[in-house]
Amino acid sequence: MSDTTHGAINPETRARALERMRSEEFDIAIVGGGVVGSGVALDAVSRGLSVALVEARDLASGTSSRSSKLIHGGLRYLEQLDFPLVREALRERALLLDRLAPHLVHPLPFLALLNHRGWERPYVGAGLVLYDTMGTAFGRSRGVPSQKHFTRTQTLKKFPALKKDSFTGAIQYYDAQVDDARHTMFLARTAVSYGAQIATRAQAVGFLREGEHVTGVKVRDLEDPDGPPIELHARQTINATGVWTDETQDMVGARGQFHVRASKGVHLLVPRDRIHGDTALTIRTETSVLFVIPWGRHWIIGTTDTDWTLDKAHPAASKKDIDYLLEHVNRYLVTPLGHDDVEGVYAGLRPLLAGESESTSALTREHIVAHPVPGLVAVAGGKYTTYRVMAADAVDAAVHGLEHDVPESVTDRIPLLGADGYLARWNARNRIADESGIHVTRIEHLLNRYGSLIDELLALIAEDPELGKPLEGADDYLAVEIVYAATHEGATHLEDVLTRRTRISIETWDRGLTAAETAVQLMAGPLGWDESHAQRELDHYRARVAAERESQEQDDDLGADAARLGAADVAPTLPVERLTDRNTRAAAGAAGEPLAAQEHAGEPVAPRG
Ligand SMILES: Cc1cc2nc3c(=O)[nH]c(=O)nc-3n(C[C@H](O)[C@H](O)[C@H](O)COP(=O)(O)OP(=O)(O)OC[C@H]3O[C@@H](n4cnc5c(N)ncnc54)[C@H](O)[C@@H]3O)c2cc1C
């Protein structure tokens, strides 16, 4: 396998990263490879710092592959009068659309449905004017057109699937859409292209300490669970573990005063032809907002918002969640959807900073950066859209602890891999199609998933024309995408490819079971799998699909969780050291010095808001 490509992640780069983690001291170690951790890696490495990141599972395997996939200011937060959050998010939206990731982030028109005559249109309209205005602040283009008002009849023309008496009119506004898992993977690859060392399936199981000072992370290689732990030494360590933040803080005995709680959000996928319309919908529910979002040849419908205290790695959707979404969307549709229309289901956990409110929908999505003990920074909360700001704040906090001067964040000027040259290639897509012999709609698909890195995929197809063929069982994708995921995008297991590098696991009726058989063969060569290894991957994937299906037939969370846990992980995580569960002073005593963590605990250094 060649990893000479700039920013490739594959088993060879992983092995080298782990080797360097064993032998070098880094400026910054990061725990967690979601959007925040990967964003921290890019921020820190592009300031000239040496960076190592460990992720216990796959890149974006936590919340960062399970969002509504919107890059947005969040109209809901406008209603909560949270102007700073909305303004910040709209600035990030413009940056992503215009400069950082134009290949991955695309404008998306929405219809905000109105339910009342009289007061609602001026109320929502004024909010959207504010939304538009904030989007143009800072002298930046907002990257999207402004709002338009529609009567009921005009709305029905745009969205014929709507029940006539279910709404009174609509206002069109724009936000943006992203494939979250791909964006996070691109962030990680971009960080690698600047020199960051990244290892997935590498779990932080404890912290290294000198007295009260955290000096790095104790890491276990989950692909070699019997191997010795790796002592990853770093001057500063950043905990970017999303809904696992409290558990990670437990490892140092310094949970602090802020806590992160999890709120489950479930989404359904149904085929595009089940709903006649061509724009996204925003529907207000009793407690929150329901989105109906076009997604390739599918619609994404979501989301729920309920407390979740069960397994965090595999939040499970129950029948109750699915019923809730179907019932709410059906209030607006002429032809109601049923369980048989549901192709795919996914559930994710919002990392919410614990607040006083009972209802999770009312909790803030803003973030916090804290310095619970010397050498350790925790960053948590926020939302996908504002990852870059969170990352910059976390690195700002960490560099206080470094001896030398460190430049300010430059990530607002660092396009992700694939962004440079994307527009020119987009404009040349017909010529690229002619030259490669691949249909222009396929070229468009590739451009919106790889940007200018499309050249690397086309080169693979030129070497082996079989790779230019559609993947059996998931023919929206080409075979080359599976190979490239293994050689360049850090996919080390079948589920990484079917769930996150592609979305085959939620976009096909059989949840990817047919595609799995070809995909496993395509991955086997580059990853060096023999027949029994490939069979193990298939068995794991099949068991996972069966467990997910079973969980979605359970009436409640407990049943869904138990059913989902029926399928084992392909590289299970290991027990961690929990200092808060023990006598922390005794533990510190063993290290020779008193532990001062509790005294420092939870002092926020950069509260947002
Ligand atoms: C249903 C839903 C819809 C959403 N929709 C949107 C939206 O449309 N737009 C938006 O802006 N935001 C949205 N969000 C919020 C957004 O998705 C999250 O805020 C964001 O993805 C959190 O990223 P993170 O990196 O903090 O966490 P994660 O992505 O969960 O990353 C944390 C990582 O840490 C790893 N980890 C944990 N413990 C360890 C350990 N010991 N060692 C190594 N690694 C470890 C985990 O495996 C995980 O990959 C949504 C969230 C949900 C749940």
Image (tube, grey):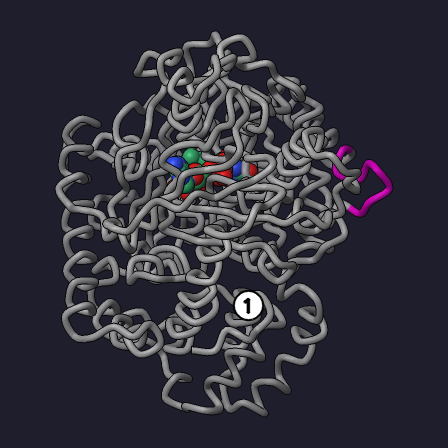
**Does the image show residue 294?**
no
Most foreground residue, 564 or 337: 564
Q: Quadrant of residue 118?
A: top right
| Residue visible at 55% across and 47% down in the picture | 38
Total labels drawn = 1
State which region is magenta: 134-141
Q: Is residue 359 above or below residue 143?
A: above
Most foreground residue, 314 or 476: 314
Most foreground residue, 355 or 250: 250
SS type, badge 1: helix
| Residue visible at 41% across and 91% down in the picture | 465
| Residue visible at 37% across and 77% down in the picture | 479
Q: Residues within 10 Å of mark 1 (few under 14, many from 20)?
A: many
Q: Is residue 457 above or below residue 110?
A: below
Residue occupied by mark 1: 450
**Does the image show residue 250?**
yes
Q: Seen from this angle, which residue lies furthest right?
A: 139
Indicate whether residue 223 is drawn in magenta. Answer: no
What is the three-letter code of the residue carrying label 1?
Tyr
Q: Is residue 317 above or below residue 597?
A: below
Task: Report x, y in % for residue 602.
Answer: 54, 15
Q: Quadrant of the N terminus?
A: bottom left
Is 544 positioned to the left or the right of 467 in the image? left
Most foreground residue, 86 or 302: 86
